[in-house]
Amino acid sequence: MIDAMNNSFFQFTAITAVFLSAVLLHITKRNSTAVSLYFIQSLAVAALLFQPLFENFSMIVLLMAGLTLAIKAVVAPLFFSKLIKRHQLKFSASTYLNTPLTLIVIAALAALTNSRIFSHIASIDPDNKKILALAIAVILVSFFLIINRKGAVSQIIGILSLENGIVAFALFSGLEQSPALQIGVIFDLFVWVIIAAVFISMIYKQFGSLDVTELKHLKE
Amino acid sequence: MQELILSQVAFFAVLALFGLGAAAALIFRKDDNLANLSSNSFAILGSLLGVAYSIAAINSDAAIFYEIKSSFPLLSLNFNIDRLAAFFIFIISLISLFCSIYGAGYIKHFYRKYSIGSLGFFYNLFILGMLCVVTASNILFFLIAWEIMSLASYFLVIYERDKQENIKAGFLYFVMTHIGTAFIILALLLMYKFTGSFDFLVIKESIGSIPPLVKDIIFILALIGFGTKAGIIPMHIWLPAAHPAAPSHVSALMSGVMIKTGIYMMIRIFFDIFIDASLWWGAAILIVGSASALLGVLYAMAENDLKKLLAYSSIENIGIILLGLGSALSFAALEMKSFAALALIASLFHILNHSVFKSLLFLGAGSVISKTHTGNIEEYGGLIKHMPQTALFFLAGSMAISALPPFNGFFSEWLTFQALFEGMKSMDSAYQWIFVFSAGSLVLTSGLALATFVKAFGVTFLARPRSEKAAHAEESSLSLRLGMAALAALCLLFGLSSGFLSEIFNKILHGIKSFGDYDPALVVSQNHLISVNGGFSSISVPAIFAVLILAGIAIFAITRFVSKEQNVKIGATWDCGTNLKPRMEITSTGFSRTLIMIFKGILKPSKQAGIEYSDANMRYFPKSRTYVLEISDVYKKYFYKPLHNFVFKISERVKKIQSGNVNAYVLYIFMALILLLFFAI
Amino acid sequence: MAEIILWIIQILILPALSPLCVGIIRKIKARFQNRQGASIFQPYSDIWKLLHKDEVISRDASWIFRFAPFAIFGATLAVSASIPIFASFLSNNFTSDILVVIYILAIGAFFLALAGLDVGGAFGGFGSSREMTVSSLAEGGLLFSLLVLSFMSGTTNLFSISGTIDSLPLASLLPVVLAFLGFFIVLLAETARFPFDNPSTHLELTMIHEAMIIEYSGKRLALIEWASANKLLIFITLGSSLFFPMGIAHSMGVIAIAAAILFYLLKILFFCIAIAIIESGISKLRLFRLPDLLLFSFILSVIALGLII
C-alpha cells in the first residue's frame, strides 16, 4: 500500500518534471538552457521507465530503460551542445508570440487538457487519470513550442520533447510495455538526431543562420 | 472444341498474352525491331484468341463468371462475361488484331526516334485495360481497369513528345478523363451506398433498395461521366486534340474501341442493372445524341486536319449510337420491349460498324500522314496514283461511314431510323416531337457526313498534288495494307450479312435483364429478308448489292457493245488557257466554305484580312494579302473558359494558405488535431 | 410468267422514257421563249451521237472518273426497279424501301461529286461543293415527305404505299398535299432544275450539276446525261405514283395495266408541263438563299407529319 502510494507519488513527480520542463522550454532564451531542460526531461522519463524494475526485475526492461537513458539523456544533449558550440548558436531566435501571450496560451492548453473533452482520453486508464492528462498536456505544449519558435534548434528540441510526452502517455495508457515499443521510440530518436546533425549543418552553411524566417531564398 | 475455347484458361490466356506482350516490349526495349515484333505478335495472338473466345461465348448459353479473391478487402477480381460483354470483347479483339498487324509496319518509322519498348508496353496494357473494363464485375476492379485504360492511353497520346501540341493534347485528355472518372466514381459509390455491395451482380439483385430520386442522380452522373469518355457534346473537347496526337494505330483503337467502353457501361447500367428507367432518361439521351451528331459532323466538315476530321466524325457517330440508345431507353421505360430491343440492336450494330470503318479510316489516314509527313489535307492531292490500294480502302471506309449501301454503315443507320420512326408512331405527344427532331437531325447528319467524306477522300486522293510532299508519296508497306484490306473487307461483309448479325444481336439481348424474353421486332426470314415492326419496313442488303452489281455490269456491257469503235484519248484538264497549277484545284477550305457560311450561327467563323502595299503612302498596289479564316471553338469560349477562370480565381485565394512557413504548417496540424479530438470524442 | 414480263417492262420503261421527258420540258420552255425549239426526241439523238464519239480523258483523272458514270447509271437502274411505275401489286420487299431509294441515289451523288473533284479543274471542285451543300440539306425534306406517306399507309414499302394512298378518305388529302409541296421542292433541288440550278447554262460560275460533268465527253457523257434524265423521271415517278396514285394498276390484267401505263404517261406530261412553267416563270435563286427554301420544304413535311401523328 505504502509502496503503491510511493510509486504513484514518484510517478506523479516525474511527470510533473516532464511537464514543467516542457513549459520552461518556452521561456528560455539561450540554447544551452534549452538543452539542459531537455536533459532533465529525459532523465524524468528514464526514471519512469526504470520504475517497473522495482516491482519485478526483468532484463529486457532494464536494457530498454538503460538504452533510453543513454540516448535521450546523454547522447542527445551532448550532441546538441557540440552543435551549439561549433556553430556558435548561443541564443535562440525569437518567437512569434511574446512571453506573456505564450504563457497565456500554455495555461489555456493546460486547462484544455483537464476539460471534459480530454478527460475521455485520460479515462483510458482511470487510475492514472491525472498523469495521462499531464502527458497530453506535454504533447500539446511541445507542439506549441514548435509552432512558436523561429529557431531551428528550438524546433527540434520541441520535437524531442514531444517524443518524451508520447512515451509518457504510452507508458501510462496501459499499452503493453513491449520492447518493440521502446525500440520504436529509440529509432525515432535516432532519426531525429541524424536529421538534426545533417540539416543543421547544411542549413547553417547555406543560409548563415538558423532563423526560419531568413530561409526564404530556397530556389538556388 | 467449344469447351476448350470457352474455358477459364482461355480467357486468362487472352489476358496473359497481352500481359506478356507488355512485358516483352519492356524486356526487349533496347532492340527496336525485336520489341516491335514481340509486342505486336503477342497482341495479334491475344486478339485471335479473344475473337475465338468471344464468338464461342456468344454462341453458348451458360453465363460465365470467374472470381479471383485478392488480399485487399472489398476488392475481388470478378469477371462476368455475359453475351453483351462477349460482344464487346469481340469488338476489342477484332480491331486490335488488325491494328496490331498494321502497327507492325507502321511503328517502323518511330525506330531510333522514340522508345519502341514503351510503345509496345503501353499498347498492350491499353488493350488489357479495355478487356478488363468490359468484363469487370466488381466496382473497385472496374475502376482500377478503367484507370489503367485511361493512363495507358494517356502515355500513348504523348508518345511523340517532341511536338508541343501532343503534350498539351495529352494533358487535356488526362484532365477530362479524370473529371469523367470523378463523376463515375460518384455514381458507383451511390450505388454501393444504397445496396451495400461492390459487386455488380449483387447490385443487380438488390436494385429495388435504391430510391427513385437517387436513381435519377446516378443516371445524370453516369451520363456525364461515361459520356466524357464517349465524347458527347459538351464533354468532347479532348477528342479532337488527343486522337490526332497518338500514333495512328492507337488512334484507331481509341476512336474505334475505347470510346465505346463508355457506351458499354451506359448500356450495362441503364439496361442491365437498372430495370425501370424513367421516361425522361431516354429523352435526355436522345437530345444529347442529336446535338452530338449534328455538331460533330458540322465541325468535321469545317476541319482541315485529316485526323481531327475523323475525330469529330467519331463524335458524330457516338451521337448516332446514342440516338439508338435513347430510343431503346424510352421504349424500355414504357415496357415496349420489342421496340426497345430493335433500338438497342441498332445501337449495338452501329457500335460494331463504327469501330470497323473508323479504324479503317484512321489507319488509312496514318498511312497517308506517314508517307507525306503532314496531316493538313490542304497539302494532299493526287495520292490515288501513288497509293492506289490505300485509296481504295479509304474509299471503302468513306462509303461505309456515309451509310451507302451495301456497306455496313447503311444497315445500322437504317435500323436507327426504324427505331426513331417507331418512336414517332407510338409515343405520346411531347416525346413524339423529340423523336421527330432526332430523326431530322439524323437525316441532316447523314447528308453532311456524305459531304464531309467526299471532301476528305476527294481532296486527299484525287486530282493533282497540291504540294511537294504529296507529289513524292509512295504506297505503304504490306502489313499496313493488310490491316486496312481486312477491315475494308469486313465493312462489306458485315453489310452483306446484316441479317445473320441481326439474329445474333437478338440472342445477345435476351441476356440483358431489361429484356429477358421478348417478341423480336426484327425478324430475318429464310432468304435474308429483314423485316421490322411487323412488316412496316423490310430490306435485304444482299439483294441491294446484287441489284447494284447487276445494273452496273449490264450498263457496262451495253455501253461497251454500242461504242466499241470509239477511242479514248488522254489529254489535259480544261485550263482556260493558263497553265495547270495546284492552285486551280479546289481546296478543302473552299469546299466546305459554303456549308460553314450556311451554319455560321453555330460554327461562328471569323475572317481576318491583312494587306501589305507596295508603297505604303500611295496604297494603290497591294503586294500581298493575308486572310486568316477560323472556326471559333464555341465550347472552349463559352463553357470551359468561364469555368476555368472561376476555378483559377478560387485557387488563387486558396493558395494563400501555403505561406512557405514551417511554423504555419505545424500550426495547421495542431489545429486539425485539436479539432479532431474535439469532434471525435 | 406475266410477272416477269411486267418486271422487264418496269425496269426498261424508265430509262426508255427519260430522255423524252427532258425533250418535252425543253420544248415547252422554248415555246415560252417564243422559239420553235428542238424536237422532243432530240435528247435521244444527242445520246446516240455522244455514244459514237471518241472520248478525251484528262491525265489527272483516276479510275474513279472512269468508273463514276457506270455507278451513277447503275444506281438509277437499281432505283427504277424499286419504285412503283404503273403497277402497285408487284412486290419487291428487298429494295423498295424509302430509305433504300434515298441512299442508292446518294451513291450516285457521291460518285458524281468525286468525279467532279477528280480532274482537278476549278469548275469541278466548286460544282461538287455546291452539289454536296444542296443535296445534304435536301435529304431531310425528301425523307420526311416520303415518311408522311408511309405513316399514312403503315409501311415504308413503296409499292404498298402506292397501293393504299388512293384508297384513303378525302380528309387525309391535306397532309398529302403539304408533303407533296415539300417533295416537289426537293425534286427541283435534286434534279438540278430552277430555282436551284440552270440545266442549260453555259456560265460556269452559275453551274452546279453541269460543273461537275464539264470534263466528260463521249460515251461517258452520254451515260451521265442519260442518268440525270433518269433521275428526273425517277423523282417525277415518285411524285406521281406515291402522292397521286390514281389510275395505278392494283391487280393483274391487260386492260388495267394498259390503262395504268396511259395514266402514267399523262401524269408525266403534267409534271413536265409544271416544271417547264416553273422554269420559265421564276429565276434561279442565289446559292445562299437555297438553304432557306430547303428548310421550308422540311418544315412543310414536318407540319404534314404533325397532322397525322
Image (cartoon, coloured by chain):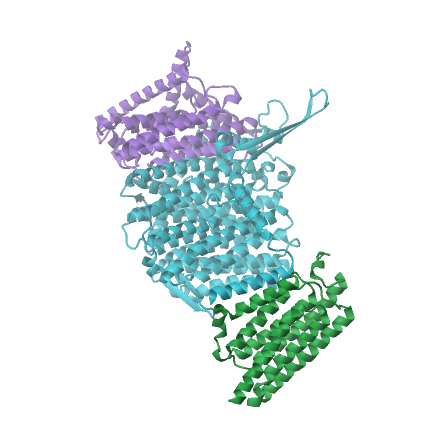
Chain colours: A green, B cyan, C purple
Of residues A125 and A104, the one drawn nearer to the viewer in this rendering: A104
Q: Is residue B114 left or right of residue B229?
A: right
Q: Position of residue A203 (x, y in %)?
A: 73, 64
Q: Is residue A108 left or right of residue C11?
A: right
Of residues C31 and C258, the one drawn nearer to the viewer in this rendering: C31
Q: Position of residue B482 (x, y in %)?
A: 52, 50
Q: Is residue B138 left or right of residue A108?
A: left
Q: Position of residue B215 (x, y in %)?
A: 36, 53
Residue at the spot 50% in from the left edge and 54% down from the top edge:
B96
Q: Position of residue A52 (x, y in %)?
A: 56, 86
- Pick out the residue farthest to the top: C34
The quadrant holding residue B133 is: bottom left
Q: Is residue C187 left or right of residue C260?
A: right
Inspect this view and state whether residue B406 appears. no
- Pick out the residue farthest to the front: A100
Report the label total. Answer: 0
Residue at the spot 76% in from the left edge and 64% down from the top edge:
A205
Residue at the spot 29% in from the left edge and 47% down from the top edge:
B334
- Position of residue B145 relative to residue B237, above or below, is below
Inspect this view and state whether residue B82 appears. yes
Residue at the spot 29% in from the left edge and 24% down from the top edge:
C264
- Position of residue B246 relative to residue A132, above or below, is above
For the N terminus of chain B, the image quarter is bottom left
The quadrant holding residue A61 is: bottom right
Of residues C130 and A40, the one drawn nearer to the viewer in this rendering: A40
The quadrant holding residue A77 is: bottom right
